[in-house]
Image: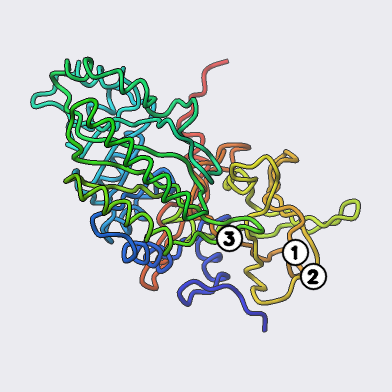
Amino acid sequence: MTAEFTVQGHPISELAARFGTPLYLYDGDVLREVYRSLRELLDPRVDILYSAKANPNVSVCAVLRSLGAGIEVSSLVELITAHRAGAAARDIVFLGPGKSVDELRACVEMGVHAVVCESLDEVELLNDLRVPGGVDVMLRVNPAFTAKGARLSMGGKPRQFGIDQAVLLRSRSFLRSLRHVRVMGVHGYMGTRILDAGNVVENTRGILAAAEELSAELGFDLETVDVGGGFGVPYFENEKDLDVEALALGVNAAVADFLGRHRSRVITELGRYLVGWCGTYVVRARYVKESMGEWFVVADGGTNHHMAAVGVGSFVKRNFPVRSLTRYEEPAERPYNVTGPLCTPNDVVAKQVALPEVRPGDLLGVERSGAYGPSASPGLFLSHGYPAEVLVLDGTPHLVRRRDTAEDLLGKQQLIPV
């Protein structure tokens, strides 16, 4: 009998029959283990905030919140999500380069720990709101140094994110003129998908040093420093797991040195690393065909649900880990191109990936897919809509997002007389 993939004792065939495909399947045991392992390694004085953008499902957020994580948000809906997931206001920070006035007012009304300001204009806009008692803000610095090892650089270069360190150092008189904003910290985020522990440590030291310089030059207390994150998840061949133990040793030493001089709250914000491992994107093979010497699996879901699988931060197509879930333990027989149902040649989830023989009806899984799945994909293309999401927690499968229906997709449209 062919062995199939299971999650907490539930065979994938049963889950697919119950919830349908395509499907995002999250393993709550893996989600908890990743967080707890990191929490045990990091200095307890380093607060972990979950970056909701990686997977904004409210149940995923709630699991991480229940373990002790705060939540970093970047939109009004993410702010509401954090609140519904049970996050305390003191454990929420709001960042993003283009906040609206409504978003800023919502932060004030909720009393979040800090608004992370990414331009001096944003600081001035908050000041103009004339909030009684003032608004606590962190300044997002775009440091003078460049991140090493980041697959996608977020700072140290010309960017829409943050305020250049040199500009901030010239802003003392402006900041001192503010009457309704209180600068209480610094935020820095250098890059994402970093797989070298030494680079994370070096970035952390650099941000802490920049925060100290800005505090001294501009005359504000460092009540909070957010050192960012960017811990990577290996997706592609020849990528190695991040050495989290070495990372924690280096980060802990940097933080201990910093806290020897400052009474600050230190935050690291993590998204992909916390949730990436727990997710599997499950599709069902509809057709298997040969074309000009290559074999194709045409599945019921593709890049419309998993745009990240076409290559994260890379101009070269590389495959996420793809497995046969129906024949989970069988050896590979031939390479297949795994495609979706879209009318574009770009709808290729995996190219020339070695799999056991695939037959129509088989289930395939794209692993390490807990981050940047539906929310970072063109789910409305060809009007297929977004897939279901299922979280298996304590042995029980929960539907945490139902799949889109035709009415979901058409209900917001207006048919005019023609």
Report crowding for label 1: few under 14, some 14 to 19, many 20 or more residues within 10 A (C-alpha). Answer: some
Q: Earlier in the sequence, mark 1 or mark 3?
A: 3
**Distance from label 2 to label 1 (Cα)?**
7 Å
Q: Which residue is mark 2?
A: 333
Please state which amino acid type lies under the numbered disc 3. Lys
**Distance from label 2 to label 3 (Cα)?**
25 Å
- Rendered image quadrant of residue 42: bottom left
Which secondary structure lies at badge 3?
A: loop
Q: Which residue is mark 3?
A: 240
Q: Earlier in the sequence, mark 2 or mark 1?
A: 2
Cβ–Cβ under 8 Å for marks 2 and 1: yes
Cβ–Cβ under 8 Å for marks 2 and 3: no
Q: Viewer-proximal residue, 276 or 296?
A: 276
| Quarter of the rendering occupied by the N terminus | bottom right
**Distance from label 1 to label 3 (Cα)?**
20 Å
Please state which amino acid type lies under the numbered disc 2. Glu
Report whether 62 appears left or right of 147.
Answer: left
Cβ–Cβ under 8 Å for marks 1 and 3: no
Please state which amino acid type lies under the numbered disc 1. Ala
- Rendered image quadrant of residue 329: bottom right
Q: Residue furthest left?
A: 133
Q: Viewer-proximal residue, 248 or 138?
A: 248
Tell me what residue is drawn at x 73 percent, y 53 percent: 298
Which secondary structure lies at badge 2?
A: loop
Front label number (2 vs 3): 3
Report whether 391 appears left or right of 357.
Answer: left
**Residue 131: image location, x then y, percent:** 13, 23
Q: Which residue is mark 1?
A: 354
**Residue 351: image location, x then y, percent:** 74, 52
Q: Residue furthest bottom?
A: 1
